[in-house]
Amino acid sequence: MRSRARRTGSAGTGPTASPTATTTLPEPALAALQATLAGEHAAVWAYGTLGPRAGRAGEDLARSMLLAHATSRDGLRALLVGAGAIPEAAEAAYALPVDPTDPATAAEVAALVEERLAAVYADLVAATSRRDLRTVAIAGVTTAAVALARWRGSAPALPGLPEYAPASSAE
Amino acid sequence: MPVVEVLGTGLLGAPAGGSAGIARRRVLLGLLGVPAGLALASCSSGAARPLPTGLTTTGGARTSTPATAPPVLDARSLVAAAKTALILIATYEATIATHPTLGPVLGPYALDHDAHLVALAERVPLPTVPLLTSAPTSGPTGPGGLPSAGQTSTAIPVPADPAGARAAVVLAEQVAGEQATAAARDARDGEAARLLASIAASRAVHALILAVPA
């Protein structure tokens, strides 16, 4: 999953070409919220792609997580709209770091998605002090960490904080 | 790990960690009462898991200046989180000492709390918890010989049956996770909030994993 760091600061460059000047969110919070939404878009796409390859048990888990991510995506959209911003649109497709061809690779893709989402939500925690956004962001870190643990069997000591991830490039 | 195995047990296999307790103890001892830089350097020698040294910023563009002190209110939250981590570690130690069969299951998660302490120590001086510093005795053999944690210095009570003891750890993790969640919500400093949110997530994962019987 590639991070699509689309700048929201330059109004008018988006596909909808609508200004975001009316938003009530400060730029760092807005950018982090858009990045989180982009991450949820990617997660929904990734789960839809990997689900059929995830095996019997994995497929059920993938389906329930796809629904959960779609719900999160809609919630983030609503937050952005409520703040007067234009929600980031989904890409048509995403580049996956691993091709989900069997249950093992499907689980790895799901784990990578959740790992990345935990980081995006953690950045959102840092980027806003608005209480409702903070609450959503904190819950997002926990949810992604739990999902990561379900796919990979364990979660890092500090989920969402890649600067503390073990430096080993094993696997 | 194949997903079928993970899902088949309904739970996540605990990562292997043989000498986890020893490494943990070394980390703890290194941290307590020692300047952060020295402690982190010393613990990086034998820890089972690569830990951030604090001397070199490991990949993060964020932790560049350890000298910047967060606002006082967050410092209090971070110290409280560290205190809770120490109590959790003591809880794991006491539980494993009373029920050695739980050692392989619990040990790896106790190590995560060490990592939390290391991260917290980069921002605030760690609290001193009496009796934890008197832990270098070779092997804990019972609850009486264990270091106790907390300001009250009372020993951590461990239920007599392993299932109850495990449930007590789950409860401790849940409560600790909720504490960190609330602290993250209220933190003024964004980076402090980010760290607290991550610690909250880790504790929630522990509670979830350990809540499902092996």
Image (cartoon, coloured by chain):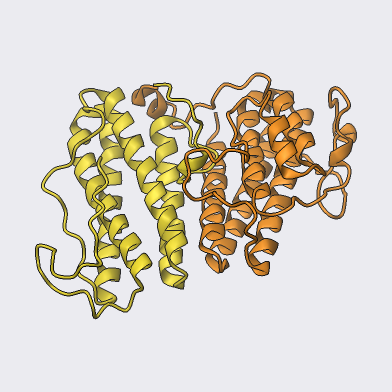
Chain colours: A yellow, B orange
Q: Judge whether A51 appears above or below B13 on screen.
A: below
Using the rendered view, name the quadrant where residue B44 is placed. Answer: top right
Q: Position of residue B39 (x, y in %)?
A: 74, 37
Q: Is A161 on the left or on the right of B175, as rendered?
A: left
Q: Is residue B126 visible?
A: yes
Using the rendered view, name the quadrant where residue A148 is placed. Answer: top left
Using the rendered view, name the quadrant where residue A48 is placed. Answer: top left
Image quarter in which the N terminus of chain A is found: top left
For the point 77% across and 44% down, the residue is B35
Q: Position of residue A9 (x, y in %)?
A: 25, 67
For the point 45% across and 46% down, the residue is A160
Q: Position of residue B22 (x, y in %)?
A: 74, 24
For the point 33% across and 69% down, the residue is A27
Q: Is residue B160 visible?
A: no
Q: Judge whether B193 appears above or below B126 on screen.
A: below
Q: Is B180 on the left or on the right of A82, as rendered?
A: right
Q: Position of residue B192 (x, y in %)?
A: 57, 58
Relative to the observer, which residue lies in front, B114 or B109? B114
Relative to the observer, which residue lies in front, A169 or B8? A169
Image quarter in which the C terminus of chain A is found: top left
Q: Is A61 on the left or on the right of B123, as rendered?
A: left
Which residue occupies the extreme top position in the image? Answer: B18
Count how many numbered circles sit on residues in the image.
Answer: 0
